[in-house]
Image (cartoon, rainbow, N blue to C red):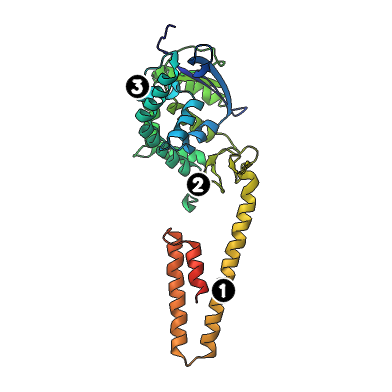
Amino acid sequence: MENLEILTDNQFYIDKISKLKLIRYTSFRYNQKHKGYEFYNKHEELKLGVQLCDFINTDFSSYEDMKKFVEQYSICTIAELGNIPIYKFYKDSDYNDLINKLIDKTAKKLSKIQKALIKDIEYIYNLNELEELNNISPTQRLYILREREQKARIFEIYEESKIRLCLNNFGDFTKFSIMNEEDAQEIAKVVKNENLLPYNYLCKNIIPTFVIELLELTTIENIEIKRCKNCGKFFVPENRSDELYCSNIFENGKTCKEVGPFKVKQKLMEENNDLKVYRNVYQKLLLRTRRNPMNDEYEKEFIEFKKKNAELKEKISNGRLTQEEYMKWLNEQ
């Protein structure tokens, strides 16, 4: 079987009206007849933001986690980052060697890009709940990131990429480069007049598409990236912008949406019970001090209790003490 190198681009289509991202790229599937992996043209339709969240949720230090991401979104969209040639057919052992080589050559680079994206996403959507960002929109925060003197690394990566763009139907591609100033000006005129116009683009690797996805998300109302209150992963709400939990399977086949509210309620109950214990101890020491105003030792112990309690609470917030250890100390008072 002739085994030629694959030289195709990856094509992506953005439709802001339906909030969809369509993808057409070369992927691999197992051929039972030939006992190996062969390439095919894969088409996929995703809600805008889903692929971006999959990327920033991937643990690139985990072989299995990265392998899952690579195989889900095509080896060909990532291989270019490691300058790895891709061929049309691989035997089992060769395919495994390809995966190992790809992970070895791109894991650190992908992790670095991921951290840059997460940092910018946290700022754009104020996921760290900074008070100074409350009164400005995601679009305004994005503008600040793009215009600041120390430009975000993720935008540098985007600008360095050779992306080809077409204001046309998916699959009908007229090639030109947006790196060309005249072309860029023409695109800007059209997009300015019809900012919801669907368009598609080609790029060698998958990274520029994440930047474009983020740029588009910030311009669409009632859609944003959030962090799940249960598992901590990033997600795009499915129905309402105020959703707190994602739809990922968390435990026992149940999603965060299903178990999240219960776990939060349970946590609040536990915190309330812990607070009751604290209040009981506080009141006990306070009353003892008031009933014995001449006993300096009681007053001294009460002051020491309040001081020690504040120190332990700070240790909990810094991760240097567990709630269980704190409660053990509290019950000993």
In this rendering, the label closer to the viewer, 2 or 3: 3
Estimate the spatial distance between the alpha carbons at disc 3 and disc 1, rounded to whole Å.
63 Å
x 47%, y 51%: residue = 132
Classify 186 as above or below 49.
Answer: above
Q: Earlier in the sequence, mark 2 or mark 3?
A: 3
Q: Position of residue 31 (x, y in %)?
A: 52, 15
In the picture, the disc for residue 198 is: none
Horizontal arrangement in the rendering, residue 164 relative to residue 13 (left or right): left
Per the image, label 1 sits on a secondary structure element best described as: helix
x 51%, y 43%: residue = 125
- Give, as a three-letter code, the residue at label 1: Arg
Front-most of residues 324 and 213 = 324
Rendering quarter of residue 211:
top left
Front-most of residues 256 and 134 = 256
Q: Earlier in the sequence, mark 3 or mark 1?
A: 3
Q: Which residue is mark 1?
A: 279
x 54%, y 72%: residue = 278
Classify 97 as above or below 32.
Answer: below
Estimate the spatial distance between the alpha carbons at disc 2 and disc 3, rounded to whole Å.
35 Å
Estimate the spatial distance between the alpha carbons at disc 2 and disc 1, rounded to whole Å.
32 Å
Per the image, label 3 sits on a secondary structure element best described as: loop
Q: Position of residue 205 (x, y in %)?
A: 42, 23
In the picture, the disc for residue 127 is: 2
Q: Residues within 10 Å of mark 3 (few under 14, many from 20)?
A: few
Per the image, label 2 sits on a secondary structure element best described as: loop
Q: Which residue is mark 3?
A: 83
- Give, as a three-letter code, the residue at label 3: Asn
Viewer can see residue 56: yes
